[in-house]
Amino acid sequence: MEIYHIPEDIRFVNQIGQTLSQEEKLKLEISLVKLSQTVKFDQLLFWGRIEGTVSNYYIAIGLTFKGNFEFPHKTFFYTANLITFQELPPLNPEYQEQVETFRALFTGQPDKILINVQEEGQDQQQPADPDPDQAQQQQKNDDDSDVEVKPPPKNFLEVDRLSYIVQAIEFDCAIVPVGAFRLTPTHELRYNDSFQGLNQQQARDLNNFQHYRAPTDQDKKELICNFHEIIFKIARDDALFHYNFLDPLSIDEPKGQWNIQSDSSKNYITVRNLQWPGFIGYHIANTPAFGYVYFGDGIKNIDLGFQL
């Protein structure tokens, strides 16, 4: 959601029973403008709000198109006080399986410890009766050794869980209309200046929306794995002249997780994801206006496959 269009675009969020108060809008606009002046991006967007029992998290996303091959770099920021945005920490894949089992609501306290790794490590590594001679020899060996010393493990905090959830929703749900973006001759993604929007019939067709992420569909790209890095390649030159080079929503599993609705005029289109309740993509037919936003509790509907 464009930061300068929040007052107008928030009407799409009203359809799922969510909104921003006047105070939230004012503070959010001030803090986002401050962030845009502090950290330079090609584009800064309001990503959404994740509800907490004590306070809410407000998320922003910075996009850098220049110098990034075929897809912009995304940087996420959060604030719980609507004063200062901070960058979300990088993901730690070690805790991925545990994070996916969390069903409790967020509290809105970023420093809350969810997994106390340091305490567990101390309990497991408590020495019984240390031998002074052995300790002295061990110290000598350590001094002579070139073995890299690993930093002590860090506790898993609520802000780490927030980072995982935000990026999971972004990967699963971020969408754009077909034709809204193009590839430049240098294979950088750019907004398509000639995009005038989908017509009413096209906008109500799920096939005319794509994931706003580096493609993963085998028909759209070629994966090259090298030194644990995945290079997403759509390097065929004909990609420059087509606009449907991103993953279509139709490949998503389980089938039926996407739902398209329109108002009585059939111009205001919303696309909702039932797997992540609270996500809403929107587009105004026959105009270049589109976007997406998330307003929810950050809990995935893992039972959707059985409900459809």
Image (tube, rainbow, N blue to C red):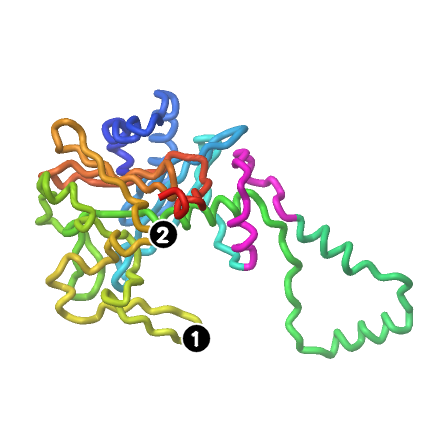
Helix, strand or loop at mark 2: helix
- Residue at image location 26% in from the left, 33% down from the top: 4
Query: Which label is found at residue 5?
Result: none
Decide if residue 187 is on the left or right side of residue 46.
left
Q: Residue at image x 15%, y 57%?
A: 243
Residue in view at x 88 percent, y 61 percent: 128
Which callout, 1 or 2, points at the residue further toward the start of the chain?
Answer: 2
Verify whether residue 105 appears in magenta. yes
Report the side of 47 relative to 288 (left or right).
right
- Write down the residue under mark 2: 171
Q: Can residue 46 be seen in this view?
A: no
Indicate the position of residue 273 as horizontal and vertical percent values: 32, 42
Callout 1: SS:
loop
| Residue that mark 1 sits on | 227
- x and y, in percent, of residue 288 in the image: 14, 41
Q: x, y percentage for residue 166? A: 42, 45
> What is the magenta range?
94-115
Quadrant of res 238: bottom left
Q: Distance between the residues labelled 1 and 2?
A: 23 Å
